[in-house]
Amino acid sequence: MTTPAPTIAAKQPTPDFSGNSPEGEAQRQVRFEERIQAGERIEPKDWMPERYRKQLTRMISQHAHSEVVGMYPEGNWITRAPTLRRKLGLLAKVQDECGHGLYLYCAAETLGVDRNELTDELLSGKAKYSSIFNYPTLSWADIGVIGWLVDGAAIVNQTPLAKCSYGPYARAMVRICKEESFHLKQGFEIVTTLAQGTPEQKKMVQESLNRWWWPVLMMFGPADAESSNSEVLMRWRVKLHSNDSLRQRFANSTVAQVKVVGLTLPDPDLRYNKATGNWDFGPIDWDEFWRVVKGQGPCNRERLRASRKKHEQGRWVREAAHAYAAKHPVN
Amino acid sequence: MDSNTTPETEAPMPLWEIFSQAKTGKPHEHVGSLHAPDATMALQNARDAYARRGSASLWVVPAEAIIASTPEDSPMFFDSAADKVYRHPQFYTIPRSVRL
Amino acid sequence: MELTAEMRGQVFDYLLRHADDRLVLGHRLSEWCGHAPMLEEDLALANIALDLIGQATLLYKLAAQTEDSGRTEDDLAFLRDPSEFRNLQLVEQPNGDFAFTIARQFFFDAYDVPFLENLSRSAHPELAGIGAKALKEAQYHLRHTQQWMLRLGDGTDESHRRLQDAVDDLWCFSQELLVPDSLNHALVAAGIAVDLEALRSLWRATVEQTLREATLEIPSDAQYMASGSRGGYHTEHLGYLLAEMQVLQRTHPGATW
């Protein structure tokens, strides 16, 4: 019978995460690494190295910020969705993304940080989020392409995370992955419908694909050689595959889908490599990648402005809720 | 708003842990947490956040009300259960012809 | 259900009214997605919007079936002009701040619960079915908006002021909810439509009780009261709303999405 791990983070007034005990820091580190290698899950009240706690807080909160900021480009087309079915589908999808942000902020909180702190980091511009959401949605076709490629890429990234070493994050990812599959299908259905539609619709979706393809490949992060945290994250089973391997996996499955849909990719260097079985793609513009990551993409300022406005405008509502709860203690 | 200032950190909204019973007859399972100003709103929000795709019953509990065993206590609390074989049905033999 | 040609036309108009109400109100709520005071509320408002648009879809489908002239539910939603829309002026009002949205929603929900309760007993079986299903959703919506009416009304001075302003500004749209016209009378006689007169005191009771508990003043009825929307007379806001909502269908006639 295995030792049951506590699954709930009880918020204690002064948590002791220092790990001080007769055992000693080094021994705890060894034991920690053994547990991870054995495939055990680390839970909120378990001892963990400070670096593990910090890396996970950063990773999970970045993921949460991405879900929430992602509501802006996608939400941009809810009021213009062209049929009742598309309206319902898109609104449900964006609602799901909001829910994902919520699950992830709550998972991050189990590591000892408050959601308001994380919100402050986002609003101050300090926190990062997935760079893909710094691009604008300029046509209805973008909604299809995002569902197909952005959610598709997210699924490739996220499915392994359902097995990561940190319990609350892994559990949140299981829930998220279940909900993502309809997003991908919806996106692909929109793309297919447009590609088989009027000449204007076909042009719309091809143009959209031309804009989104390279930023989507950049979603997998910098090339392995440039990726600083990867090694320790992989040893701690927080990151389970390298950026390049996931990028290639995504490219391989997507190129086939592009052909089925009857569209083309904006990559003159795209070649099937018989020896490796991979689709070799052309050079990624890493200058663009780093510029956008550092805040110089087309929508970085706008996303931040929208996030700040949301927070500021909601302040009086949150204050009212607090005030009412104080006036009516037993509810 | 000046992009160089950090907004004042607000008073935290209370944290609630959410338990959902997938179907009647099943136990309630911990599904996650959320923030809400009070119990009524917590229950409302729990339904929207964790039961969009269905639930038979929801419990919301203030996070600080949960008293949990600590990992340090686990050996003392749980390991000796592994030795108490008399608690398991396999310890006992019953003639094959008897059905209980 | 067997309908005379005349009654078929009346039922069609009736269905459009209620479908338009829900589509327009759901559309307004969907504008909040990503902008609500907290994530939990983004989820809640999106949920109400989805329920309303879902109900609208069922009603448009039934309307299209009733009209039986080849128009689909999407044709009805996306290809009619503002003067052909039959929704209440209340639901087309822009969102304003959170207090305005909550007050607008509360006024509608307080009507919708008894309305759907009655609709679920309609002699028209499909309409009764839609009523029964939507009723559960409406009960949930009313609980949500009632809770916020209390929290904003009896919260801080600022929230109280904002909500009082919202209630005062929206009061003029409340009368239309419950004033029947000749179409309503004809269909009530046929056992199909809901008798709005019978709902009025229920609506008043719910609203007045909540306003009082929220420490808010009940506005006077001695003021301009909006009317005419069931006949296609709207405020300036509907034009903008539909221009945005219908743009793709209007720009690409006949296309499939």
Image (spheres, coloured by chain):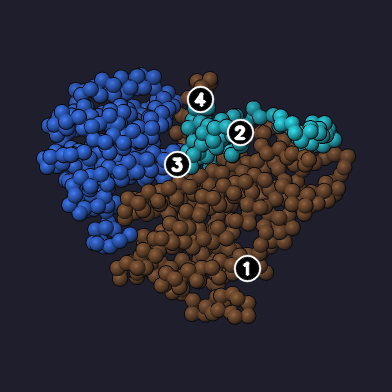
Chain colours: A brown, B cyan, C blue
Outermost residue on the right side: it is A22
- Label 1, secondary structure: give it: helix
Marks 3 & 2, CB-CB < 8 Å contact:
no
Q: Which residue is mark 4?
A: A325
Kindly indicate whether the residue at mark 1 contacts the one at mark 4 (C-beta within 8 angstroms): no
Residue drawn where x is 79% and y is 33% of the image = B95
CA distance separating discs 3 and 2: 29 Å
From the image, state whether disc 3 or disc 2 is nearer to you.
2
Rendering coords of residue A117 (x, y %): 59, 42
Q: Which residue is mark 1?
A: A244
Could you give the CA–CA distance between mark 4 and mark 1, rounded to whole angstroms?
50 Å
Residue denoted by label 2: B27
Picture coordinates of residue A252 (x, y %)? Answer: 55, 70
In percent of width and height, residue A52 lies at 72, 50
Which residue is the extreme one toward the front?
B97
Q: Indicate the secondary structure of the residue bearing disc 4.
A: helix
Amino acid on which disc 2 is placed: Pro
Amino acid type assigned to the residue bearing label 3 in the image: Asp
Q: Nearer the viewer, residue A255 or C88?
A: A255
What amino acid type should be assigned to the residue bearing mark 1? Answer: Asp
- Residue plotted at (19% across, 49% down): C68
